[in-house]
């Protein structure tokens, strides 16, 4: 009996298919995690006591308040911002803190996010630092208060599910009011959690920050066990230009003030000074609180690295002093003199009282005052910046209007988010120009460059999500262009909404470098499409000093495109031995040697058009100029 030869092969294929269907990398990750946790439990003398510190301060050892806040952030993102239908493209624009005159943005901005990555980062920060802050707050208290509010503050469930989340929400709204510019995100509150915790647990706060990184890597590994990356050109904004530094610093300082207040209220001893100093320094540097920057034009940013690090060292000194300062007189000699009876008898009563009050000022009071003053300095610039409104100057192009919003495109347009305070007092935010997709809503005092020119040029397309409480709309911006050989680019910007598309911007002409039959060609963008401009050079025997093309008699070789004079395309970039005459355009008062034409329609793909002695051929979105066997690529679609 002959054995079935295909049996082993089929069995191997079945096993391979079964293994391919298993999440092997995720299973490996799970096994590694269980091994690490199992080792900890096995080597701990009393594993059950590992959670005793948690159950001693938190209800069942769970940070219920932090989890409630995380649920609120998820509800805002996936509900109010429509992130459930478009997770990677939520509604952002209406929920930024644009102006004090737009209450919706001011209330919602502290809990909304710009993208799923932004949300994930703040959720992880909330879980780590929020849990540590809630642990510091505690669900249990020795003080039983009377009254409904007092009992709520004393009861573990009330402290966990009501008091803590309510305080966080209130802080999120208030901190947005004093944050600089059109901020969005929960990061100010996350930094406040860290500042609150670092007052009592400086080293543990640093360890928690490292733990956030571990959680982030773990989440990425579960979501995407394997990633294939390909090197490619892309448009990117400097990393520091996407960080709300002022909001982060403000949150941290406000958290420190609250932490110092609780430390004094409970009459607890501060941590060792070296712990506070190291904790604040490592946190401030690792969280980029030194990255002070400002704008210089629409897409230019200046990072003041040295100034930022100097301010961080000042922050370390102020916070350390504010936390560990002792309750001793600042001027001990003055205090002693005011208490000396023999000296006091010789001093007038009023002077003696003033001297006593001055001498009784303690280091602890001065330290707290220093932190409060630092908070005030950080808050100060935000007030005039947030007192802004949208300018009503005419917008460029033909804007699309939707529910009070106007969307268009412009270049070198004065920024329209204007301060209501006179420029002589507070400065005017409209002092620079911007370029890109512009969105304005004068009713909500919004004026924004939603997508910059550089970003749109890199991606070719962008979506603008508009909306409000209970509605949303999308406008799509598209950039179509032709790159002239050896020259610039001519492009057109179109906006589409509700199955309708309209042009809103057309750039100037882009001149190609090669000279063909004594003529230069340029691609010209118009509202209706693209055309070709043709004009003779000063002399038909002129030499192109750019070094890319020389045409003295119409039979020269364009060395810039590596095309032969007999019409053969040696690079495979163009046609060879073309004979199709195509459409001919007859121009009046034109000699056989000289042509001047403007906005000659660009031939469609696979078609050609003849203008005087030059034939223009569109082959696979590449435009070629042909004359007496010379084939030169003059532009390509980009």
Image (cartoon, rainbow, N blue to C red):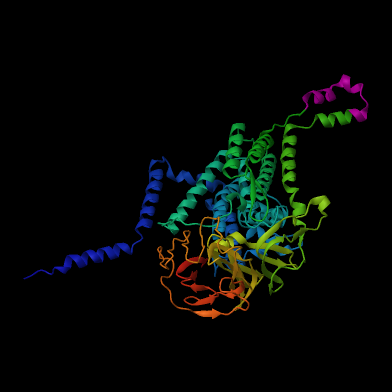
152 falls in the magenta region: no
Residue 622 in sight here: no
Query: x, y percentage for residue 359?
Result: 81, 29
Chief secondary structure of the magenta span?
Answer: helix
Query: x, y percentage for residue 166?
Result: 66, 57
Query: x, y percentage for residue 129?
Result: 57, 48
344 falls in the magenta region: yes
Q: Nearer the viewer, residue 610 or 285?
A: 610
Q: Nearer the viewer, residue 57 or 556?
A: 556
The span shown in magenta is 331-351
Q: Nearer the viewer, residue 332 or 468?
A: 468
Query: x, y percentage for residue 404?
Result: 72, 72
The part of the image, by quadrant, that contains residue 452 is: bottom right
Can you name the residue that lies furthest to the right here? 348
The part of the image, by quadrant, that contains residue 499 is: bottom right
370 in relation to 16, above or below = above
**Image quarter of the N terminus:** bottom left
239 in relation to 74, above or below = above
Relative placement, left or right, of 348 versus 528 is right
Residue at (49, 51) in percent of width and height: 215
Residue at (43, 68) in percent of width and height: 567
Relative placement, left or right, of 336 versus 168 is right
């Amino acid at each position: 009996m002959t054995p079935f030869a295909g049996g082993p092969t089929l069995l191997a294929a079945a096993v391979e298919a079964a293994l391919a269907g298993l999440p092997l990398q995720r299973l490996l990750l799970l096994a590694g995690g269980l091994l690490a946790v199992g080792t900890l439990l096995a080597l701990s003398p009393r594993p059950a006591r590992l959670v005793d510190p948690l159950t001693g301060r938190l209800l069942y050892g769970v940070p219920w308040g932090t989890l409630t806040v995380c649920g609120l952030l998820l509800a805002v993102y996936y509900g109010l911002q429509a992130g459930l239908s478009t997770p990677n493209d939520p509604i952002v624009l209406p929920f930024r803190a644009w102006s004090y005159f737009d209450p919706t943005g001011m209330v919602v901005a502290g809990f909304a996010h710009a993208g799923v990555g932004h949300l994930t980062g703040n959720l992880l920060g909330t879980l780590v630092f929020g849990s540590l802050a809630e642990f510091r707050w505690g669900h249990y208290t020795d003080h039983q208060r009377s009254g409904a509010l007092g009992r709520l503050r004393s009861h573990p469930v009330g402290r966990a599910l009501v008091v803590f989340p309510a305080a966080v929400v209130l802080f999120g709204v208030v901190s947005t009011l004093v944050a600089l510019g059109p901020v969005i995100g929960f990061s100010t509150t996350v930094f406040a959690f860290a500042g609150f915790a670092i007052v009592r647990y400086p080293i543990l706060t640093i360890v928690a920050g490292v733990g956030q990184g571990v959680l982030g890597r773990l989440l990425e590994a579960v979501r995407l066990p394997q990633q294939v990356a390909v090197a490619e050109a892309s448009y990117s904004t400097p990393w520091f230009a996407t960080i709300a530094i002022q909001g982060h610093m403000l949150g941290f300082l406000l958290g420190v003030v609250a932490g110092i207040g609780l430390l004094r209220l409970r009459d607890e001893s501060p941590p060792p000074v070296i712990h506070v100093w190291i904790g604040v320094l490592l946190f401030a540097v690792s969280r980029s609180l030194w990255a002070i920057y400002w704008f210089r034009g629409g897409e230019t940013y200046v990072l003041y690295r040295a100034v930022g690090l100097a301010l961080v060292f000042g922050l370390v000194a102020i916070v350390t002093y504010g936390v560990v300062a002792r309750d001793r007189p600042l001027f001990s000699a003055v205090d002693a003199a005011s208490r000396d009876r023999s000296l006091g008898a010789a001093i007038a009563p009023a002077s003696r009282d003033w001297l006593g009050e001055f001498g009784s000022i303690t280091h602890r009071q001065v330290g707290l005052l220093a932190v409060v003053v630092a908070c005030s300095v950080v808050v100060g610039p935000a007030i005039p910046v947030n007192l802004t409104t949208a300018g009503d100057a005419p917008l460029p192009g033909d804007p699309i209007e939707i529910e009070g919003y106007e969307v268009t495109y412009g270049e070198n347009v004065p920024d329209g988010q204007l301060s209501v305070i006179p420029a002589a007092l507070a400065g005017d935010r409209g002092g620079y120009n911007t370029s890109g997709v512009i969105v304005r809503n004068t009713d909500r005092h919004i004026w924004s460059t939603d997508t910059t020119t550089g970003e749109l040029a890199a991606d070719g397309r962008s979506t603008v999500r508009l909306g409000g409480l209970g509605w949303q709309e999308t406008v799509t911006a598209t950039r179509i262009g032709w790159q002239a050989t050896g020259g610039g680019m001519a492009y057109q910007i179109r906006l589409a909404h509700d199955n309708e598309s309209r042009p809103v911007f057309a750039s100037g002409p882009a001149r190609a470098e090669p000279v063909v039959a004594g003529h230069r060609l340029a691609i010209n963008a118009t509202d209706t499409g693209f055309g070709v401009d043709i004009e003779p050079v000063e002399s038909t025997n002129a030499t192109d000093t750019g070094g890319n093309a020389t045409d003295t008699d119409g039979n020269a070789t364009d060395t810039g495109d590596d095309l032969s004079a007999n019409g053969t395309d040696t690079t495979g970039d163009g046609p060879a031995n073309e004979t199709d005459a195509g459409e001919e355009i007859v121009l009046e008062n034109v000699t056989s040697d000289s042509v001047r034409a403007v906005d000659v329609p660009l031939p469609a793909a696979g078609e050609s058009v003849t203008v005087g002695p030059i034939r223009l051929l569109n082959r696979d979105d590449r435009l070629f100029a042909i004359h007496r066997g010379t084939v030169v690529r003059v532009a390509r679609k980009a």
